[in-house]
Amino acid sequence: MIPISKPYIGEEEKQAVLAVLDSGMLAQGPRVAEFEERFAALCGVRQAVATSSGTTALHLALLAHGIGPGDEVITSPFTFIASANSILFTGATPVFVDVDEETFNLNPALVEATVTPRTRAIMPVHLYGYICDMDALQAIAGRYNLAIIEDACQAVGATFQGLKAGSFGTGVFSLYATKNVMSAEGGMITTNDEAIAEQCRLLRSHGMKRRYYYETLGYNFRLTDLQAAIGLAQLQRLERFTERRRANAAYLTANIHSVITPRVKDSYGHVWHQYTVRVGGGRDRDAAVRRLNEAGIGTGVFYPVPVHQHDHIRQVVGDVRMPVAERLAREVISLPVHPLLSQDDLETIAAGVNRL
């Protein structure tokens, strides 16, 4: 089976973890600080704050912006559940805007109509490694004095007009085991706002600046030096692996003809966390998945149920319709695109899809 994802664990990661074990400094320490510094440099921002997961990073970013009960946050219905859950954790309400069928991201033409006096932020989701139209979203945010909290959990290294994901507002990344940069588990918040960074640091560690003196209610959302050591090793090969992902995606797009393949607009730098095709024309997506798996091709369906249709979300937002997101959820299949694919793998994937 050609796996849909395949985390790379090399000698660099192993030696980095052993060095931390030998140091005796296992909790949040110098490796975390170094990881934050290098991640901030990667994104072109002044500050980065490491956390225990992408979900906790989203939660802290919202709290650092003062978002809480009575507030609304505009976001996508076509994403992993953590995007909306993190809004609910604060007591705020997610407000969904339908997505563009070509980019899978928020349709900026529909966003402004959903702004109300209670709206505090826009949370664009850079799905599959493709940045949202940040020019349009920043313009809307500027007109209504809204924060931008980028859910860039799948988009480390992605660019829009030469600027990196995580640099358009407060950025949030996941370091989960299948991500383009991983630390087994973890998250990162990026920002140019010193006050936001300081608040995130305070909240991730029980509201404590000075040992055992607590300034506010906080959480234990820290990253360990063991995880940071893995992340540092991963950063060293990010550029090379991103180019492999781009080459693999280009091959698949050039050689797959039986389904709708993704397209990338000019001035966007896709990092292909996922390569996602659409089985259109009313065809049975689930049957296509079974046929691909039987042919030895791993697949993923990200995501089979739009966020607004989950029961605990419906209890908050009611029965809303997002027709594009709902259709995409019936059509999408993600194919292997990871940097460890061989040429034979790529040929097998393309041939298998073309037999659908």
Image: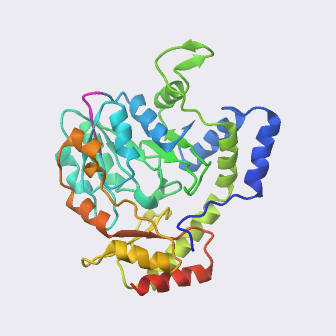
From the viewer's side, name the closer residue of 315 and 146. 315
* Residue 261 visible in the picture: no
Write the residue at 82% across / 38% down.
22
Image location (x, y in percent) of residue 174: 51, 47
Image location (x, y in percent) of residue 230: 68, 48
Left or right: 167 in relation to 307: right
* Residue 231 visible in the picture: yes
Relative to 210, is 130 above or below? below
Residue 11: image quadrant is bottom right
Left or right: 94 in relation to 234: left
Write the residue at 55% across / 57% down.
178
Write the residue at 44% across / 60% down.
128
Image location (x, y in percent) of residue 87: 34, 37
Image location (x, y in percent) of residue 76: 31, 51
Q: Is residue 72 magenta?
A: yes
Q: Quadrant of the N terminus?
A: bottom right
Residues rendered magenta in the picture: 69-74
